[in-house]
Image (cartoon, helix red, strand yellow):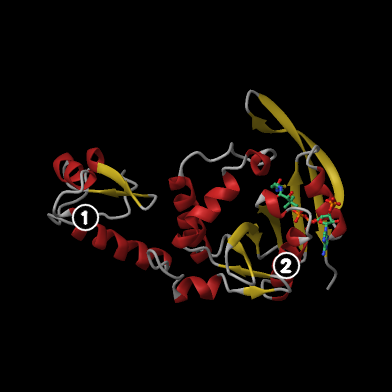
Amino acid sequence: MTTSLNRFCPRSGEPVSDDSLTRHRGRTVGFCNPGCRDDFDNGGPRAVEDRRYFDVLIRESTGLLPGGRAGKALEAVLPTLNSERLRLRAPRETDVEALFAVFSDPKVTRYWSHPPWTDRAQATELIDHICQHALNGQLFQWAIAEGSNDRLIGTVTLFFVNRSHRRCEVGFALRSDRWGEGLANEALSRAMRYGQDKLDLRRFEADVDPDNSASLGLLKRLGFEEEGRARARWRVGDGVQDSILLGRVVSD
Ligand SMILES: CC(C)(COP(=O)(O)OP(=O)(O)OC[C@H]1O[C@@H](n2cnc3c(N)ncnc32)[C@H](O)[C@@H]1OP(=O)(O)O)[C@@H](O)C(=O)NCCC(=O)NCCS
């Protein structure tokens, strides 16, 4: 089965064929035959119209306006949250460069679940992923932007949100030249307050590399307690890595 964004070829209206797929703005898109696909990839005369067609589909499925601001649908599920120095907001396509700067830095990904990014398309794909899953109500991954200039300097996330059991997991990453100013603390506190007040969550969980002292320190300052050690939880390079599991419980 094809995983293409569009089911029908923008040129012929025929069904998309599995041997005629390509990428556009981090999404898989397709044509009815490899000839149309190659023409699109090579920027042929009809590629402009094709791109416009795919952009409309992206906008419809994510609420994200290509190259512009997050659409209303996205703002409704991932609302902008302000704090003293920061603005947590939906990511935009214009954040690609700033997001790439965060996750292409080996210092940031040292204890992260993937190696440093090498390609800006990875940033586009993450933005797409965030928008899609936010609209499904499964993932709340805000861009951490500076309040003064709206520039993205990291992300903060509530994920595996389980409304029945009132819990979620938390994640956070900040551009390395902004560590040590208490900004992650400010961003995570604001995101968890949203989780408590608007999503009615009562338990926040984290899974941290035992050597990630910055992250463990941050979580403990925010009231997380260690609840155990899970052995060999992550494959990292050729080896495996344990996790410290932490939880913070909010009473009603
Ligand atoms: C983990 C991470 C987000 C922490 O970012 P951070 O903004 O430095 O963390 P905090 O908000 O807790 O800031 C704490 C530091 O700021 C200092 N600070 C300065 N001004 C402060 C203020 N106004 N308020 C609070 N702390 C302040 C604190 O003294 C502390 O310094 P220390 O670590 O030397 O003790 C960051 O190291 C990171 O992005 N790491 C890579 C990604 C990662 O591993 N994520 C976690 C995966 S589980």
Residue 55: % across, % down: 31, 62
Q: To which quarter of the image does residue 137 belong?
A: bottom right
Amino acid type, mark 1: Phe
Residue on which disc 1 sits = 8
Residue 235 seen from this side: yes
**On the rendered structure, is 252 left or right of 236?**
right
Quarter placement of the C terminus? bottom right
Marks 1 and 2, how far apart at CA: 41 Å
> Viewer-proximal residue, 233 or 40?
40
Q: Is residue 113 above or below residue 93?
A: above
Residue 160 seen from this side: no
Q: Residue at x 50, y 59 (%)?
A: 95
Q: Residue at x 20, y 48 (%)?
A: 43
Numbered badge on residue 177: none
| Local crowd size for mark 1, using a 10 Å CA cut-off: few (<14), some (14–19), many (≥20) | some
Secondary structure under tag 2 reads: loop
Q: Residue at x 70, y 28 (%)?
A: 240
**Nearer-N-terminus badge (1/2):** 1
> Viewer-proximal residue, 173 or 33?
173
Q: Residue at x 82, y 39 (%)?
A: 229
Residue on which disc 2 sits = 201
> Viewer-proximal residue, 210 or 88?
88
Residue 226: % across, % down: 86, 48
Residue 227: % across, % down: 85, 47
**On the rendered structure, is 234 left or right of 150?**
right
Q: How many marks?
A: 2
Amino acid type, mark 2: Leu
Residues at circles 1 and 2 in contact by the CB criterion of under 8 Å: no
Ligand 1 placement by image quarter? bottom right
Q: To which quarter of the image does residue 89 belong?
A: bottom right
